Every structure is written in structure tokens, then in C-alpha cells.
Image (cartoon, rainbow, N blue to C red):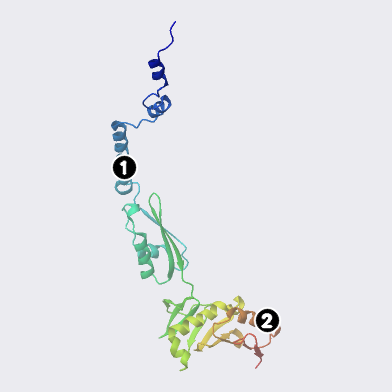
């Protein structure tokens, strides 16, 4: 029997044209979808987006219906709600929380900070931080509360208990002219915040003559020469030690905490 001819052997030895079967199978497996599945997907995405927009803006389920207030001490929740003026029965997502915060801080000076947030599905939450009076200033028979930053935020007809009176007796020194009444007031309030708690409770008034001449008057006729608000921590520690060592003294000078003085009249 004759073997394959030379031509047949040459044909068998030549490489086949086109991709190998393995690549062809892979192509079939990962063939891109046709136009119809893509169209269905696009329509579904569009419908979902439209539904989400309707749910947020058109649905009656996600509307601002309540205003919840927390953190008040002197203020009432109703006062905060009135000042916030939250637009009720509007889409919750459309409520401008920044505008609400601005209104509250502008209309209610007692508010130092307020966090405004959406509480789904239908509530605006207002968490208020009120200013704390550290001192009071008397003018024309009225008492103005002053916070730790020196801000006057409330006016009262009667002097509140437990808050020291700030007596401004500024001289004509360069420091008084430089800082001005507002700067001196801030420095005096800074001194109040530095006092040991027991001394703070016993402080009746602060007399401010200049930036570095602040004197405290305590119950029992005692006085403290504090100086400025600088080195407040060292002054507080020195004062505590002096009062413990000399409970009978009625004048303490800690304006220079490294060289304090104490005396009895």
C-alpha cells in the first residue's frame, strides 16, 4: 500500500489558519451581550433613579414633620423651635440645615453651638450647647451675662447668684488703651475660668484696673491679687497651697507665682 504523497505530507506539516480551538471556546463563553439586554438594563436603572428621586422629593413618607430639641438648660425647647423656624411639610432632604443653624445663632445669643441633622424618616434634630455665664457686668441697673470668651449674651433685671460681678476700673495705662474694654473683659473672664473650684464659688467680684492688674474679692473680706491671666495654672496651684498653709490670712498675692505673698489685716 503506497504511503502519503509528498504533497499530502506538506499539507499536514503546514500550520492551520485561524485561532486555536481553545481561544474559540473562550470567545464563545465571554461573548458580549446583545443590544436587547443592554436596553433592558438601561431602562431598569432609569426607573430606579426616578423612583429614588420621587421617594426623596415627592413622597409624603420622607417629609419634615417634627423638630426634636436636646441640650437646653435655661432655654426651653419651644423657644429653640420658634427661632429655628424649620420649614415643616417639606422634603426632609431639601431642608437647609446650615440656614437653620445660622438663624438660631443669630436670633438666640445664648446658643454657643447647635448641631442640626436629619433624622429619617421625618425629623429634624437640634442639639444645643448654651453659653455658660462666667461673670456679669452691671450697666444702668441691668446685669449682662458674659461667657468664657468675653461675649455678652444675655441681659437680666436681677443679679444671678453664684456668678462674680466684673467691675471695670481701667486706668489710662498703655495696656488698657491697647486692649480696650472688650479685651480687658476677656482677660478677666479668663482669670475666672482658671480659679480653683472652691475659690471660684467664693468669688464675689473681680476688679480690673489694667491687663496685668486684676484683683478678686472673696466672701469673708478676703482678696487675691491675681495679675493677668498668664500662668494661670501655676497661680492656681500656688493659691491653693497658700490658703491651705495660711487659712487665717485675708490677702493673697499670686501675681508672681514663684514669689507669692500672704498677709493678714
Name of the residue lying farthest toward the top? 1
Describe residue 38's horizontal placement relative to residue 250 as left or right. left
| Callout 1–callout 2 Cβ contact below 8 Å | no
Please, is residue 137 above or below residue 88 in the view?
Answer: below
Question: Relative to residue 225, is residue 177 drawn left or right?
Answer: left
**To which residue does mark 2 refer?**
241
Whether residue 133 sits left or right of residue 195 in the image: it is: left
User: Along the line of sight, which residue is nearer the eye, 92 or 178?
Assistant: 178
The residue that mark 1 highlights is 51
Point 41% across, 28% down: residue? 23
- Of 152 and 230, which appears nearest the observer? 230
State which tag comes first along the sequence, 1 or 2: 1
Number of the label disc, if any, that sits on residue 75? none
Q: Is residue 169 visible?
A: no
Q: Residue at x 47, y 85 (%)?
A: 184
Q: Is residue 178 visible?
A: yes
- Residue 110, x across and y down, in percent: 42, 71
Quadrant containing the C terminus is bottom right
Dot 2 falls on a residue whose secondary structure is helix
Crowding near the residue tagged with mark 2, few <14, some 14–19, many ≥20 C-alpha atoms within 10 Å? few
> Mark 1 and mark 2: span between their CA atoms?
71 Å
Q: Position of residue 154 (x, y in %)?
A: 42, 75
The x, y position of residue 108, in whole percent, is 39, 70
Amino acid at each position: 500500500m503506497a504511503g502519503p504523497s509528498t504533497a499530502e505530507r506538506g499539507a499536514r506539516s503546514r500550520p492551520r489558519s485561524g485561532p486555536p480551538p481553545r481561544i474559540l471556546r473562550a470567545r464563545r463563553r465571554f461573548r458580549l451581550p446583545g443590544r436587547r439586554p443592554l436596553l433592558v438594563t438601561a431602562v431598569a436603572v432609569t426607573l430606579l433613579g426616578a423612583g429614588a428621586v420621587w421617594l426623596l422629593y415627592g413622597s409624603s413618607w420622607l417629609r419634615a414633620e417634627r423638630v426634636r430639641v436636646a441640650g437646653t438648660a435655661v432655654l426651653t425647647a419651644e423657644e429653640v423651635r420658634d427661632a429655628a423656624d424649620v420649614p415643616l411639610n417639606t422634603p426632609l432632604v431639601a431642608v437647609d440645615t446650615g440656614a437653620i443653624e445660622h438663624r438660631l445663632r443669630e436670633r438666640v445669643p445664648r446658643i454657643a453651638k447647635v448641631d442640626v441633622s436629619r433624622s429619617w424618616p421625618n425629623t429634624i434634630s437640634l442639639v444645643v450647647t448654651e453659653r455658660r455665664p462666667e461673670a456679669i457686668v452691671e450697666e444702668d441697673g441691668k446685669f449682662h451675662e458674659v461667657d468664657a470668651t468675653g461675649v455678652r449674651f444675655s441681659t437680666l433685671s436681677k443679679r444671678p447668684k453664684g456668678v462674680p460681678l466684673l467691675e471695670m476700673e481701667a486706668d489710662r495705662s498703655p495696656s488698657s488703651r491697647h486692649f480696650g474694654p472688650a479685651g480687658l473683659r476677656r482677660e478677666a473672664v479668663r482669670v475666672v475660668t482658671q480659679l480653683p473650684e472652691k475659690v471660684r464659688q467664693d468669688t464675689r467680684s473681680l476688679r480690673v484696673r489694667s491687663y496685668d492688674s486684676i484683683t478678686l474679692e472673696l466672701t469673708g473680706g478676703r482678696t487675691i491679687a491675681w495679675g493677668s491671666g498668664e500662668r494661670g495654672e501655676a497661680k492656681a496651684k500656688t493659691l491653693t497651697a497658700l490658703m491651705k498653709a495660711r487659712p487665717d490670712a485675708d490677702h493673697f498675692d499670686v501675681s508672681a507665682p514663684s514669689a507669692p505673698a500672704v498677709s493678714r489685716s
